[in-house]
Image (cartoon, helix red, strand yellow):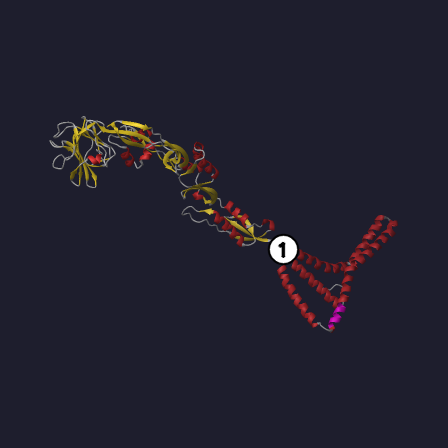
């Protein structure tokens, strides 16, 4: 190693070597920071050991030597500048003195002088470089460290081969992935959505680092082949498909209800089934084309059904055979007039078109109804039997009833009275006087005086013979014109309706329960049959003279526990 000329003392040589070592150290640090850090550590350990050995007396000498070294270093640094300044002054004077021999000669001589000065003092420039180069290397090192540490690093997140964002740590991605997964709506047996990310460390500034929400949005954009935003259609909890045209689907569903809302202002208009539209993320395998869902909600699931009336059909048999109620049958077919018209061959509607989304309309309506008046009949013995006179006209009352009507797809399904009726006006009772006096018989009969009503109609003339004992005449002979109506004296069941050659002839026996029966004999014809239930006052036969009879009359008997008793008190004959 060649030692420069100015460094002749041992300390100067050591300082030169130290400067040279530092220069190399900083140079190497600037080139490869990690290796230089190791070298620096070793150097510091060596310096520490050397300093430890030099504690005490050598410390003073070292301080003095350090001062000399610093002065030498100052001299080394300043000498090139002083020499250059002095040389420049000499060069100016030389050129000025030689101008008289010509400018060219002066410049050549000045150039020669400048070259000799540079060669003579070149070592000073080298000495300066020994200080400048380590400082420059240190500056490069500090710049490199500052740039590296001042910059940023991040994890580049790649999904499906594309970079979707940058995060400081993997937990940010995990949070973003969970945000996406929580939004996915599963509708059946689909495989859960999964994604396998990769992470790479890259340099990045703060502006490029993503938060969890931004990263979640980027993941969604990158996963379009697997999941997408859509609106799902749910009917009674069952998923029927999702579409990207959610607003269009909502408008189509509203359009189904719109006519019913217009026709029934103020009514409650809802779908029969529970309809829900749920927006969210769906797997693409669950998403259908909008036209497919539109066809589902607008097409009927069942067409109109009909039935042709056949001979022997009744409204009850038609309704029962087709699984509908009698009220539904009448509502669908006004032509039936509630059972009063049943033309054979007439085609009836027994089932309307049923849409996928049936609309139910419930509306409330207040209606006025008549309250029928009661009729009170009062026996009047001053009037002939069969005669009546209205002494007070009856007037129906009026009441307001609130009804709740339920329609499905426009057809009335139910009519229910709600709340208590409000009486607007009370009915006025009708009062009728009924004649009970039979002049020919000299007796008065009553239709309400006993437990039974008088059995013979307005054709009654008189009673030709009364009850005279079980073994004698055990009934009442009530005379009337041929064909006069005979009525049931009390409600019961017909146990006999037939004819014998003699005796009672054509006659009827009615069982009233409790051991009581009544018999109606010598009839000209019957209108009831065995097993038939009759009401009090219902027509059962007509007056005649069949069997053992000498004239038209009704032989009437009251039988209690098998014994004939006097029937007069039962039918109000005084």
Quarter residue 408 falls in: top left
x 40%, y 43%: residue: 236
Residue 437 appears in which quarter of the rendering? Answer: top left
Is 217 placed left or right of 388 in the picture?
right
Q: How many marks do you count on the picture?
A: 1
Q: Is residue 233 above or below residue 458?
A: below
Residue 34 part of the magenta segment: no
Q: Which residue is mark 1?
A: 148
Q: In front here: 22 or 298? A: 298
Q: Position of residue 134 (x, y in %)?
A: 70, 59
| Residue 428 horizontal side relative to residue 550, left or right | right
Q: What residue span does the magenta drawing correspond to?
A: 58-65
* Disc 1: CA contacts within 10 A as few (<14), some (14-19) or many (>=20): few
Q: Nearer the viewer, residue 382 or 341?
A: 382
* Quadrant in the picture for the C terminus: top left
Residue at 40%, 40% in the rendered image: 273
Q: Quadrant of the N terminus?
A: bottom right
Mark 1 secondary-structure assignment: helix
Q: Position of residue 429 (x, y in %)?
A: 34, 32
Residue 225 seen anywhere in this rendered image of the structure: no
Q: Is residue 417 above or below residue 142?
A: above
Residue located at (75% from left, 59% from top): 128
């Amino acid at each position: 190693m060649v030692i420069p000329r100015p460094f002749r003392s041992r300390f100067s040589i050591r300082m030169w070597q130290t400067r040279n070592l530092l220069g190399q150290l900083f140079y190497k640090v600037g080139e490869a920071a990690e290796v230089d850090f190791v070298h620096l550590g070793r150097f510091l350990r060596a310096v520490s050991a050397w300093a430890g050995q030099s504690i005490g007396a050598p410390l003073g000498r070292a301080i003095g030597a350090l001062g000399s070294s610093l002065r030498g270093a100052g001299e080394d640094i300043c000498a090139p500048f002083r020499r250059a300044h002095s040389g420049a002054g000499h060069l100016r004077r030389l050129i000025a003195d030689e101008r008289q021999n010509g400018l060219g000669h002066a410049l050549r001589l000045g150039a020669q002088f400048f070259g000799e000065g540079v060669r003579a003092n070149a070592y000073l420039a080298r000495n300066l470089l020994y200080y400048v180069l380590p400082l420059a290397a240190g500056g490069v090192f500090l710049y490199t460290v500052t740039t590296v540490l001042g910059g940023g690093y991040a994890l580049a997140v790649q999904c499906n081969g594309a970079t979707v964002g940058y995060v400081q740590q993997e937990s940010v991605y995990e949070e973003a992935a969970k945000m996406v997964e929580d939004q996915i709506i599963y509708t059946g047996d689909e495989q859960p959505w999964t994604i396998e990310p990769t992470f790479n460390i890259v340099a990045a500034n703060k502006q490029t680092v993503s938060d969890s929400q931004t990263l979640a949005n980027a993941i969604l954009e990158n996963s379009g082949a697997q999941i997408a935003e859509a609106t799902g259609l749910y009917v009674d909890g069952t998923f029927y498909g999702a579409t990207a045209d959610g607003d269009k689907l909502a408008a189509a569903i509203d359009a189904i209800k719109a006519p019913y809302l217009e026709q029934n202002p103020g009514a409650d208009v809802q779908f029969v089934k529970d309809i829900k539209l749920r927006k969210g993320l769906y797997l693409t395998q669950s998403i259908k084309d909008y036209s497919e869902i539109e066809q589902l909600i607008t097409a009927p699931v069942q067409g109109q059904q009909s039935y042709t009336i056949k001979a022997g059909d009744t409204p009850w048999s038609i309704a029962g055979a087709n699984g509908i109620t009698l009220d539904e049958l009448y509502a669908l077919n006004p032509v039936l007039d509630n059972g009063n018209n049943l033309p054979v061959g007439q085609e009836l509607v027994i089932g309307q078109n049923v849409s996928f989304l049936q609309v139910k309309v419930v509306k409330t309506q207040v209606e006025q109804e008549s309250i029928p008046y009661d009729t009170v009949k009062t026996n009047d013995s001053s009037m002939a039997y069969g005669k009546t006179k209205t002494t007070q006209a009856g007037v129906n009352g009026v009441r307001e009833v609130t009804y709740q009507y339920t329609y499905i797809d426009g057809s009335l399904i139910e009519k229910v009275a709600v709340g208590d009726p409000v009486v607007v006006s009370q009915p006025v009772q009708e009062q009728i006087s009924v004649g009970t006096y039979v002049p020919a018989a000299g007796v008065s009969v009553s239709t309400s005086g006993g437990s039974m009503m008088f059995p013979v109609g307005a054709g009654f003339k008189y009673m030709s013979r009364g009850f005279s004992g079980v073994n004698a005449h055990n009934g009442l002979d009530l005379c009337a014109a041929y064909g006069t109506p005979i009525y049931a004296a009390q409600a019961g069941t017909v146990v006999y309706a037939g004819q014998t050659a003699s005796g009672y002839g054509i006659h009827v026996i009615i069982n009233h329960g409790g051991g009581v029966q009544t018999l109606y004999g010598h009839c000209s014809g019957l209108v009831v049959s065995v097993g038939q239930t009759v009401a009090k006052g219902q027509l059962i036969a007509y007056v005649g003279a069949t069997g053992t009879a000498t004239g038209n009359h009704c032989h009437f008997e009251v039988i209690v526990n098998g014994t004939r008793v006097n029937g007069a008190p039962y039918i109000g004959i005084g």
